Amino acid sequence: MSYCVHCGVELADSEKRCPLCHTRVVDPASPEAGQGRPPYPRYEVITPERVSKRSVLLVMALIFLVPICLVVVCDLSLHARVTWAGFVMGALLCVYVFLAGPILSVGRWYHAATLCVAADAAVVLGYLRYIERTTGGHWFADFAAPVVLLAALSVGVVILLRQHAGATRLMVAAVAVAEAGVFCLVLELMLNRAFGLRDKLVWSLYPFVTAEILAILLAVIDRTPALKEKLGRKFFL
């Protein structure tokens, strides 16, 4: 074992140059220097292989097909027709659409995010409509549809604000928090109207007030560069 004449690092018999300072190995006492087996594998640049989006979606579809087939067979064996299996299939379809959208829009998320939100809202509305018709309820038009559309609209506003308006992340967070507070308020209003629970607001006022105060705080921080920079350094943002 020899040492580098420049930096003094310990060298293996197979080294031709110092791995630290790249100085040529000079060791007259070791004529076989540079001829032994390297102590570590040679570095090679590996190009990652791209996976086809269609292949990923196909594998996901096959995975989701397994529980669907199981619940259908089980339901048919018990009731000779599809009853509760429809709820499971609808839920799995919703999950599949939720996952497929981001996969298809990899690399161009901002351009396809609005379409993903629209597709998610559509599949959820269809699933809730199926539940209403199967159970004989009358809550879809008065409650489910407005709530889902309001949630989709809120998410769409955040996406468009970030994509087209060029808002900062902190301002987008402020808008999202404010929308969450308003959503809670509207949700209780819709519950009271659709199901006749009460004639006044109760629980939604607490998240509404808290969310609006936090939204104002985030907006003030975003509009104050010195405070924003100081907090960013303090919390490593």
Image: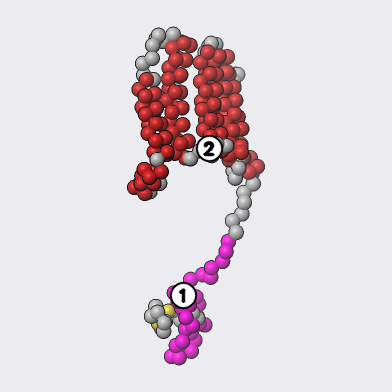
Closer to us: 154 or 83: 154
What SS does tag 1 mark?
A: loop
Q: Which disc, if any, is residue 19? A: 1
Residue 61 in picture, x, y percent from top left: 61, 36
In the rendered structure, does residue 43 fall within the stretch colored magenta? yes
Residue 225, relative to residue 41: is it above or below? above
- What residue sits right under mark 2 in the picture? 162
* Three-letter amino acid code of the residue under disc 1: Pro
Give coordinates of residue 72: x percent, y percent: 58, 26
> What amino acid is found at the position of numbered circle 2 in the picture?
Arg
The stretch in magenta equals: 18-46
Mark 2: few/some/many CA within 10 Å (<14, 14-19, 20+): some
Q: Residue at x 62, y 51 (%)?
A: 50
Count of numbered badges drawn on the protein: 2
Q: Position of residue 38 (x, y in %)?
A: 49, 75
148 w.r.t. 222: above or below = above
